[in-house]
């Protein structure tokens, strides 16, 4: 027998998704069923028992073992969780190439909800949910509980379109109580400094955090980050917002191995590595062999010494997340061949590596050349830093509209050339 909220959730899914959900919610007759009220992992009471319990399958002490032992890697070599994935392929800087961003995990249409939750009636298996929840005397047991959990997620900032994504990754959330689980975990996030405006994003990125004990898992993780890694207590909120997965993935071994590697490879002191983790906590998840080392070797290959590499990585750690072939190499070649700059200029302006070649670097360079305002010597990388409006005022001496029109024309020309080559 399944609980009502389990049947409600699974009846809406396709066959494959339903099978996945039922694996997370096995019937009481299944050998995978355990009682949530039991202190140990013992089989549930017999079918004749009337004692209420919520069923769930326990495969590991971690709610999703594949988070720790995943075989799916990003192009930077990072192990990617099939559930709590992170858009690490997209640069933290908003100027990064659009084609660098990851695709959505699921191609299924999002669950669209209005503020009054009226649209959930057709897309989620709770027909006439608002009526059932408020006025229907014979409403099905469990429907109101499902509704209240969805309503709570929306109330803390989860976007309507992300509800389906969260349920597909963490269907157990429909079994968690609002008062004893959902609210307490949200209160924990607030207690470490996460602003209310970011709660929804963190829950969407790492919905499995609700399956972790606050006292025995989440708080010890925060203490480890402060006491062992060395992150300032005031920076914990920033770290969690940048990478919510640090709360739900083991970081002890990853910190030790990465700190040891960077110390031996680059002579990095602990303070520098702590700065890297604070600015870009995804570093704790990148593969050393497939992610970190190849990018360090690339910077060496273009003439950087270890001290220069350390300066770049301390200032812009996200360099370790950039694609070698589609990002770092093309920008280096443009720096040397077109901008006539030396590699050493990157130690002063490491931000150059995070800017979009097609959206910012090349358009600004070509625009100044067309206006005959580009210097004969090395092109000033400082002209790439300010906003488009400031660039037009300080460097081009022209209107923003004229520059935007030039950039669009340049991009259309480039697109036409690429299309002709493909044809």
Image (cartoon, helix red, strand yellow):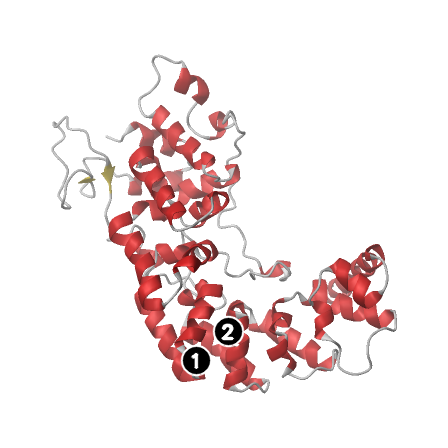
How many numbered marks, from 0 up? 2
**Circles 1, 2 touching at the beta carbon (< 8 Å):** yes
Quadrant housing residue 24:
top left
Left or right of 352 on screen, residue 320:
left
Residue 365 image position (x, y, % from top left): 77, 71
Q: Position of residue 90 (x, y in %)?
A: 55, 60
The residues bearing labels 1 and 2 have C-alpha atoms spaced at a distance of: 9 Å
Question: Is 248 on the left or on the right of 390, as rendered?
Answer: left
Which secondary structure, mark 2? helix
- Residue 232 visible in this rendered orientation of the protein: yes
Q: Is residue 310 above or below residue 126?
A: below
Q: Which residue is mark 1?
A: 268
Q: Earlier in the sequence, mark 1 or mark 2?
A: 1
Q: Height in image: 128 above or below 402?
A: above
User: Would you say residue 110 is visible in this rendering?
Assistant: no
Query: Residue, x 61% and y 71% (percent of image)?
Result: 353
At x 59% / y 84%, what residue is drawn? 302
Residue at image point 30% right, 56% down: 65
Q: State the quadrant of the N terminus.
A: top left
Percent of width and height locating residue 5: 33, 30
Q: Which mark is residue 207?
A: none
């Amino acid at each position: 027998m399944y609980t009502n909220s389990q049947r409600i959730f699974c009846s809406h899914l396709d066959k494959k998704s339903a099978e996945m959900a039922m694996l997370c919610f096995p019937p009481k007759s299944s050998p995978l069923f355990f009682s949530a009220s039991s202190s140990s992992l013992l089989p549930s009471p017999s079918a004749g028992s009337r004692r209420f319990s919520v069923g769930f399958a326990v495969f590991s002490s971690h709610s999703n073992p594949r988070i720790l032992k995943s075989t799916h890697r990003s192009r930077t070599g990072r192990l990617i969780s099939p559930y709590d994935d992170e858009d690490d392929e997209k640069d933290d800087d908003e100027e990064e190439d659009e084609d660098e961003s990851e695709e959505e995990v699921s191609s299924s249409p999002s669950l669209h909800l209005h503020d009054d939750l009226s649209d959930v009636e057709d897309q989620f298996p709770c027909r006439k949910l608002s009526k059932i929840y408020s006025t229907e005397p014979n409403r099905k047991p469990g429907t109101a509980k499902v509704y209240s959990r969805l309503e709570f997620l929306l109330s803390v900032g989860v976007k309507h379109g992300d509800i389906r994504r969260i349920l597909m990754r963490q269907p157990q959330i429909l079994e968690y109580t609002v008062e004893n689980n959902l609210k307490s975990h949200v209160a924990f996030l607030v207690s470490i400094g996460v602003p209310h405006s970011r709660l929804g994003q963190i829950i969407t990125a790492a919905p499995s955090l609700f399956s972790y004990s606050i006292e025995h898992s989440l708080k010890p993780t925060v203490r480890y980050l402060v006491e062992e890694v060395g992150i300032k207590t005031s920076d914990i909120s920033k770290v969690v917002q940048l990478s919510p997965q640090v709360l739900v993935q083991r970081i002890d071994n990853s910190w030790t191995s990465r700190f040891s590697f960077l110390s031996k490879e680059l002579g990095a002191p602990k303070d520098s590595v702590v700065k890297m983790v604070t600015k870009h906590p995804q570093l704790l998840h990148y593969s050393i062999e497939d992610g970190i080392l190849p990018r360090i070797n690339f910077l060496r290959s273009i003439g950087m010494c270890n001290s220069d590499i350390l300066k770049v990585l301390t200032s812009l750690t996200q360099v370790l997340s950039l694609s070698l072939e589609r990002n770092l190499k093309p920008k280096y070649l443009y720096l040397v061949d077109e901008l006539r700059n030396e590699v050493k200029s990157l130690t002063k302006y490491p931000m150059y590596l995070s800017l979009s070649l097609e959206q910012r670097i090349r358009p600004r360079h070509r625009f100044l050349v067309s206006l005959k305002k580009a210097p004969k010597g090395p092109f000033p990388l400082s002209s790439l830093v300010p906003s488009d409006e400031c660039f037009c005022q300080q460097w081009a001496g022209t209107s923003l509209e004229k520059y935007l029109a030039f950039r669009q024309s340049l991009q259309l020309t480039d697109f036409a050339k690429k299309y002709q080559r493909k044809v």
